[in-house]
Amino acid sequence: MDQEKTPAQLKAELYELRLQLEEATDTIEAIRTGMVDAFVVHSDNGHQLYTLKTADQTYRVLIEKMGEGAITLNNRGIILYSNSRFAEMVGISLDKVIGKSFSEFIDGSISDKLNEVIASADTSDYKTEETLKYDGCPPVPVLLSLTSLNLDEGTALSVLITDLSLQKETQRVLKSKNDELEEARNKAVQLNNELEDTVLERTRDLSVSREHFVLMANNIPQITWTNLPGGQFNFFNQRWYDYTGLSFVETFEQAWTNVIHPDDLALTMEKFRHSLETSSTFEIENRYKRNDGLYRWHLNRSIPLKNEDGELIFWVGTATDIDDQRKAIEKKDEFIGIASHELKTPLTSLKAYLQLITNYRKEVVPVQVKSFVSKAEGSLGKLQNLVNDLLDVSKIQAGKLYFNQAPLNVSELLSVCAENAGHMFPEYNIIYHQSADLWIKGNTERLEQVLMNLINNAVKYSPLHKDVILSVEKEDDQIKISVTDFGIGLSPEQQEKIFERFYRVDDKNFMASGLGMGLYISMEIVKNHRGTMGVKSKINKGSVFYILLPLLK
């Protein structure tokens, strides 16, 4: 039985163990910080000292500062050295890493690989991807780079551990993006194929549509053409070539220039340019030269074709031969003029005979006869007005509507018209409030004719509302005369045509007499006074016809 140690002995042994512990601690700290190049590992065969042949202070500092984990293993996979980065990667302190088996940190055994590398003494670079793990830490994909080291105590391994988390995440994102890109590419290919099919189908449709258009255009009696948005001609139908005798090249070199009559060309081009600038319908009557050199009148009309967004695509134009129609109208106007003149004399004589009967005093004229005479005078007055209108139309068409003009007071003219209308239409309220004196240069009889025509129309088309208002006002350097009624009104389409010759308002619920010449004649009279006429109207709300005339300065 061993002899019990005295307190002094125990104290001496305790002091010795403390010194050994402090020395071991200093040694471990010195090795960790790179102050020494050796390490003592306890094994079954006792303590073994490991040293690095090529290690130095600079190398250790570099290893400690690098971003990758770095460890040294012996031939049994025990960690002899580790930098702080590896300890961070596995989530434990550095002093607990050293002395552990490397297999504790690797997902799956790599002993075969370690043995293979160790067995190959000249292995300088062996790489493999593994998963780094430790209890309580999420797995980390890493790249292991193994290199054999020759130590005094035998062969060891130097292992660099590179964190592949960011690279793997980047690869995952890239793969995901590539998959999305591939999917998008497949869809794009599909859409492109569908688009190609649609384009082919639309091309076939457009080709058929164009063939139909050309077939139709070449089989109508009118000249037809199309223009690009800027006005350039890009198509003429066969009728154009047959009529003008021009070739394809001559057509697109000359187009209208050598076909339209020189007297009509300037006005035609002016109106065409205006239509291009405003995208409004182009319409004009002019003369086209035929292939035999003769000119014939044509009605030109071109309309803009727009897409769903309101953008101009192209123009479609036609020219209709109206030469025979114009000649027929000229003959009709000539006949009307002659007939009106021939009717005027017997009508004057008839009116005189009726007045003689009315004023006959030698014998008593029966009351019934007087009634018949009165009715005959009324009908005769209407007939005379009709003949006078026909004569005016004839003069207008011949450009011979002449009359003298002199300064006149518009207020007095309106007063006279209001008074006369009051006698002619006693059941209506002809309202005119006297205004300040305004003077113009004009013909009293002709302007009175215009105003009485407007008042007559106001009465005629206002069967229920009995108020007709006359007014005059100054607008800049013009005067504006207005006749307002509260009758059936006019639609926008009717307002566009109301001043045309022989145009009559067609209303299913209302019939009125007349040939539709009054407003046409009135407009021409006002034009000869260097003025203009217009209308503002709404259906069932009434109308305002107005005259604008230059103020006498």
Image (spheres, rainbow, N blue to C red):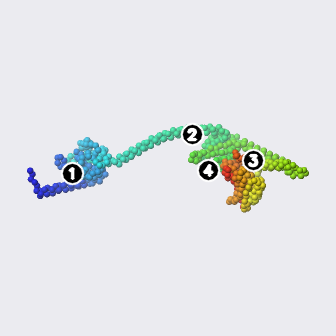
**Residue at mark 1 to residue at mark 2: CA–CA distance:** 89 Å
In x, y percent, where is residue 126? 28, 44
For marks 3 and 4, give the one nearer the viewer.
3
Does any portion of residue 300 appear in the rendered image?
Answer: yes
* Residue marked by disc 1: 39
* Separation of residues labelled 1 and 3 (CA atoms): 130 Å
**Cα distance in 3D space between marks 4 and 1:** 96 Å
Which amino acid type is marked by label 4? Answer: Glu
User: Which numbered circle lies on residue 514?
Assistant: 3
Q: Position of residue 236 (x, y in %)?
A: 63, 41
Q: Which residue is mark 2?
A: 206
Q: Nearer the viewer, residue 351 or 228?
A: 351
Label 2 crowding class (10 Å Cα cut-off): few <14, some 14-19, many 20+? few
* Distance from Cα at disc 2 to Cα at disc 3: 51 Å
Q: Earlier in the sequence, mark 1 or mark 3?
A: 1
Callout 2 amino acid: Leu
Residue that protrudes farthest toward the right in the picture: 362
Residue with the mark numbered 4: 277
Is label 4 in contact with label 1 (beta carbons under 8 Å)?
Answer: no
Name the residue type under label 3: Gly
Residue 253 in percent (x, y) is at 63, 44
Q: Secondary structure at mark 2?
A: helix
